Amino acid sequence: MFVYILRRVLTMIPTLFVISLLIFFIIELPAGDYISNQIAMLRSTGEASSIAKLEFLRSEFAMDRPFFERYLVWIGAWPGPHGFDGLLQGNWGWSFEFEKPVSEVVGPTLPLTLILNAATILFVYVVSFPIGIYSATRQYSWGDYGFTLLGYLGLATPNFLLGLILLYFFNQWFGLSIGGLMDPKYIGQPWSMDKTMSVMAHLIVPTIVIGTSGTAAMIRRLRANLLDELHKQYVTTARAKGLSEGKALVKYPLRMALNPFISDIGNLIPSLVSGSVIVSVVLNLPTVGPVLLSALQSQDQFLAGFILLFVAVLTLLGMLVSDLLLAVLDPRIRLGGRAGA
């Protein structure tokens, strides 16, 4: 297992380089950049005094160099104006829109983003797992029809619309504002037990809003997979030999049906980040979603590039975790990994 993990981690390194190159290429596809847009705006208004400063920034951050050289300077594999000073050296870049380092822009939002994503993933699996099993083992029952209807509603309802509905009803019924991830008095304050409890309380609504569609999809998938396994010959044989329904369910069908259920962990992470951008704006959540949206709109390339690369790292780590869980769940996958090692 250690050799497998080491091999996977080593594989992630060239994968991240390829992903970073694609991210940098896609971000630079639109014509111009943040500085070019600012220079064009200043020239149109007749303000020439700040153009020299912007031209200095262009040279300071190697934006006047060829594409591949700019990319290598960004990741820290090529000397820039300050030598080797890029992502590999711990420099996340400079945000032109916020006029400060990217680390200071996204630093406060990254922990909250991780906490929200972890809570949402936990919610998706905790809710969808028992409902999916219930619907599969009680096919065409009233409960199955009810959960199916709720699943379709969850898939059809946009997350931002559900967020607006909850904002309205919580305010009308309880007089509460559910925006943000903590009480305003804790913003910018060091972490404490009171601040942690405030974050936990404010996590409930965003977790439900963001996780609703993912939960509905997981329920439908687990139900379909488990129904397929329950109708196979080995389950019929186990029942004929007198094995109880509980053991006949847990011994093999449930474990086999969970394979795609577990493998979706890696795919769930980027969908949560991308799918929560509008929800974060609606609910005023201090996560990387609104920052990414603003960076893409203003073509703040270093800020947008780092956030997208951060999501890519989370995705690769999620895929590694899902593969390790699959190896524990399915002996065939585990033995295959050992043979390869």
Image (spheres, rainbow, N blue to C red):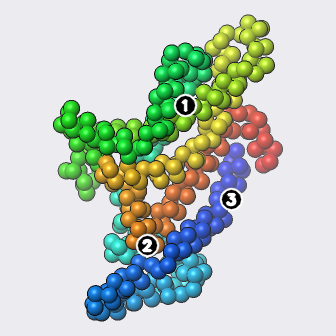
Residue drawn at x 59%, y 54% as measured from the top left? 316
In the image, residue 225 lies at what x, y percent? Answer: 66, 29
The earlier-in-sequence mark between 3 and 1 is 3
Residue at x-position 43% and y-position 86%? 58
The residue that appears at 61% across and 48% down in the rendered structure is: 319
**In the image, residue 272 above or below residue 157:** below
Q: Which mark is residue 219?
A: 1
**Crowding at label 2, few (<14), some or many (≥20) Cα neighbours within 10 Å?**
many
Q: Local crowd at mark 3 within 10 Å, few (<14), some, or many (≥20)?
A: few
CA separation, marks 2 and 3?
31 Å
Residue positioned 72% across, 20% down in the render:
231
| Residue 175 location (% of width, % of height) | 18, 37
Name the residue carrying label 2.
299
Mark 2 vs mark 1, CA separation in Å: 39 Å
> Visible in this render: residue 147?
yes
Q: Dot 3 corresponds to which residue? A: 11
Badge 2 amino acid: Gln
Label 1 amino acid? Ile
Observer able to see residue 206:
no
Q: Secondary structure at mark 3?
A: helix
Horizontal arrangement in the rendering, residue 81 relative to residue 177 (left or right)? right
